[in-house]
Image: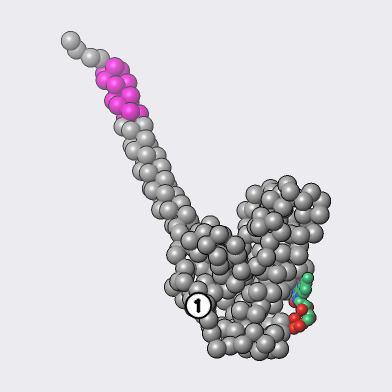
Amino acid sequence: MYLKNDDLSRLNSNMRCIHVAIILCLCALLVATSYFSRRAVAMEKLNKTIELPGPRQNSEFSLERALRERRSVREYRRESITLAQLSQLLWAAQGISDPRGYRTAPSAGALYPLEVYVMVGDVKDLPVGVYHYRPDGHRLLRVASDDRRKQMERAALGQDWVRQNAALLVFTAVESRTTGKYRQRGIRYVHIEVGHAAQNVMLQVQALGLGAAVVGAFDDDQVGEILDLPSNERALYLMPVGKPR
Ligand SMILES: Cc1cc2nc3c(=O)[nH]c(=O)nc-3n(C[C@H](O)[C@H](O)[C@H](O)COP(=O)(O)O)c2cc1C
């Protein structure tokens, strides 16, 4: 069978179209594969759990000295703090200190509505990012791998100690854990609890030779968005920490 010139050129152009389509499909496949594998690596990094070093349970630094010397410190040296120091602060905030699950700070009905996040800027052996403290197992879960402290500074009405620190602790609360039992009064209990936890951290900061401040002036909604908080969780208090200048 003979093909006419017209048929031949139509066949050629069809073949060219098929080739282009195959190449385009391969390119799309390549782009999709690399996108999904990068996403998988990022997700794996994000959900990474970091076991914290065990907190020390004793020191020579007296409680009286911590109470006497404690002051709000808002300027920090550009130096890292250690993972052991961060571990100690988180333990002071919400660490489990009793086999029955009770924690370092009191909680109405032992319902523990507080959550603690750390925005890491300069902590030895811990990459920059946002971490969620898990009291069970004294661990951190990495929830973001970028530095969001500049956004936090804006949300905190430009207070630059919210950005320039070694780490920024963020206390949030799931109020329903407490209001489920104590109804409207539960809100008061949650606010009292965050004061207990923050004071624990303040005194521990002092005993470690670090400096910290507490920050209550910020836009709740903005902080919620920066942290990707679920709708039932609210930010209550920020604590920048670093080596005092
Ligand atoms: C509920 C509360 C909210 C606060 N908010 C802020 C704040 O937004 N920014 C800040 O720099 N300090 C804040 N502070 C810290 C006070 O300014 C500070 O404790 C006070 O000036 C006394 O200083 P001292 O902590 O050194 O004793 C807050 C303190 C409390 C108890």
What residue lies at 71% left-to-right and 89% top-to-bottom?
68
What residue lies at 60% left-to-right and 65% top-to-bottom?
103
What residue lies at 72% left-to-right and 52% top-to-bottom?
178
* The image quarter in which residue 201 lies: bottom right
Main secondary structure along the magenta-highlighted residues: helix
Q: Quadrant of ligand 1?
A: bottom right
Left or right side of 174 for 86? left
Q: Residue furthest top?
A: 1
Q: Which of 121 and 140 lies nearest the eye of the viewer?
A: 140
Q: Amino acid at mark 1?
A: Arg
Q: Please name the residue that numbered disc 1 is placed on.
A: 56
Left or right side of 154 for 58? left
Quarter of the image with the C terminus is bottom right
Mark 1 secondary-structure assignment: loop
Q: Is residue 20 above or below residue 209?
A: above
224 in the magenta segment: no
